[in-house]
Image (cartoon, coloured by chain):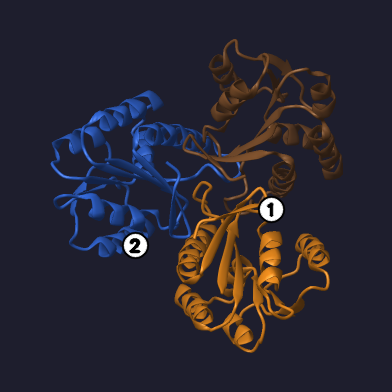
Chain colours: A orange, B brown, C blue
Amino acid sequence: MKALFIGGIKSGKSFLAEKHSLKNATSKPYYLATTEFIDPEMHERIKAHKMQRKENFTTIEEPLKLHYVVSQLDALVLVECVSIWINNMLYHEKNFDEMKKEIKDILALDKDIVFVLNDVGSGIIPQNKLARQFVDISGKLSQLLARECDEVFHVIAGIGTKIK
Amino acid sequence: MKALFIGGIKSGKSFLAEKHSLKNATSKPYYLATTEFIDPEMHERIKAHKMQRKENFTTIEEPLKLHYVVSQLDALVLVECVSIWINNMLYHEKNFDEMKKEIKDILALDKDIVFVLNDVGSGIIPQNKLARQFVDISGKLSQLLARECDEVFHVIAGIGTKIK
Amino acid sequence: MKALFIGGIKSGKSFLAEKHSLKNATSKPYYLATTEFIDPEMHERIKAHKMQRKENFTTIEEPLKLHYVVSQLDALVLVECVSIWINNMLYHEKNFDEMKKEIKDILALDKDIVFVLNDVGSGIIPQNKLARQFVDISGKLSQLLARECDEVFHVIAGIGTKIK
């Protein structure tokens, strides 16, 4: 079982993805945190997220090698989130093809995986070139993920609508 | 009956919320305008909106005290809109907890209320800290509203899709 | 038959609109490319799009006179895309009423037309006045298009959800 939760900032996608993971896991699931760059604001957000998920998940932190880490795990993995991972990959000067390969590899694993992705493409096209590049990559990878996932949920105002 | 209409800029959410209000009101409904800060551009928008709703609503203006005002009214109230109210609250240096309390209080009223909210979270994360704060608050309050409303409509291109 | 595909940047809307056009065309369809202003980045995007559609369409380029061009054609027309056309019209100092007239005229044609439009209204309200004007026009025209189209699809992560 693979699922994708896509939604805007503070749409409630993480909460729904966690619920979905807990419901579908047959043993204690993993929470794969992709965060790497901690600024104070980000730190606060993460603390709030951590409190939310309490003791239900085993948390693992990995900013880049998603496929390798997930391939080693023996229970459902919640990847939280793909957007921060894209950010990390860009920071480490990985190109789109490398990201695409990593996503394809992880999708090819015979594992239960729940992906969370920030929908960033429905505002005005950003003037900043890096932001534009991020939006493009995010959109293309979201299509790749959605194509291979069994279920896709669009989340808005805390409500997940199943679109696949 | 409580309903939430959420959609992007010029998605047609206000028009649908007005139609929904008129259809569900058992006596002449109120239009609670939250606008406070009038610049010329905003003024034009409001004039266009006013013409749209003609004589079907009794218009009341209140930028901050939503709960108090709604508690005094004896017919369906259309709150237009929550996003401008958030803006007003930020301007008056109210914090998130104060906003959350106000929204919880209004949701606890045994009244028919239709809320309109701008979906601002599906673009790139804004660089401006205040804008980021606004997006966060808007997202969290949209979840709170959606949880307590009987019906939630996502509006795009003038089409309201019932997601709850 | 008229259809509208609306979605964010790299949501996969063009690909779905092309598939829809090929499925619904009774003879070789036209691809009406509205692009006018070529910068290198734009050029790359267009090349990628062109490869995608190969030999299935007859490509025509017209940045402004949508109605006139479509009225001359004798098969299904895919208008790719309305957003770039709005941009062109703004650049040539056409006002909203002129755009509205053009769109109304094209919708009045008894032809099979598939429109593609970028959803730009679900981010934060842009600070730049021209961007704000673009978002407003885009939203209003999307409502006009959706009202007259037989089918409307909201595209996210490559998945088209029929909302009308």
Q: Chain of mark 2?
A: C
- Label 1, secondary structure: give it: loop
Give the left or right position of residue A44, taking residue B130 as reference: right
Quarter of the figure with the N terminus of chain A = bottom right
* Residue C14, position as x, y percentages in the image: 35, 54
- The quadrant in which residue C45 appears is bottom left
* Mark 2 neighbour density, 10 Å: few (under 14) some (14–19) many (20 or more): few
- Any mark on residue A130, and which? none
Residue at 47% across, 45% down: C119
Residue ID for mark 2:
C44
Q: Amino acid at mark 2?
A: Glu
Residue C67 seen anywhere in this rendered image of the structure = yes
* Residue A5, position as x, y percentages in the image: 59, 62
Residue ID for mark 1:
A10
Front residue of C37/C61: it is C61
* Mark 1 neighbour density, 10 Å: few (under 14) some (14–19) many (20 or more): many
Q: Is residue B68 above or below residue C66?
A: above
Q: Are marks 2 and 1 on the same chain?
A: no
Front residue of A141/B107: it is B107
Front residue of B55/B3: it is B3
Give the left or right position of residue A62, taking residue A140 as reference: right
Residue at 59% across, 27% down: B20
Q: Nearer the viewer, mark 2 or mark 1?
A: 1
- The quadrant in which residue B85 appears is top right
Residue at 69% across, 45% down: B131
Q: CA distance from mark 2 to mark 1?
A: 33 Å
- Label 2, secondary structure: give it: helix
Q: Amino acid at mark 1?
A: Lys
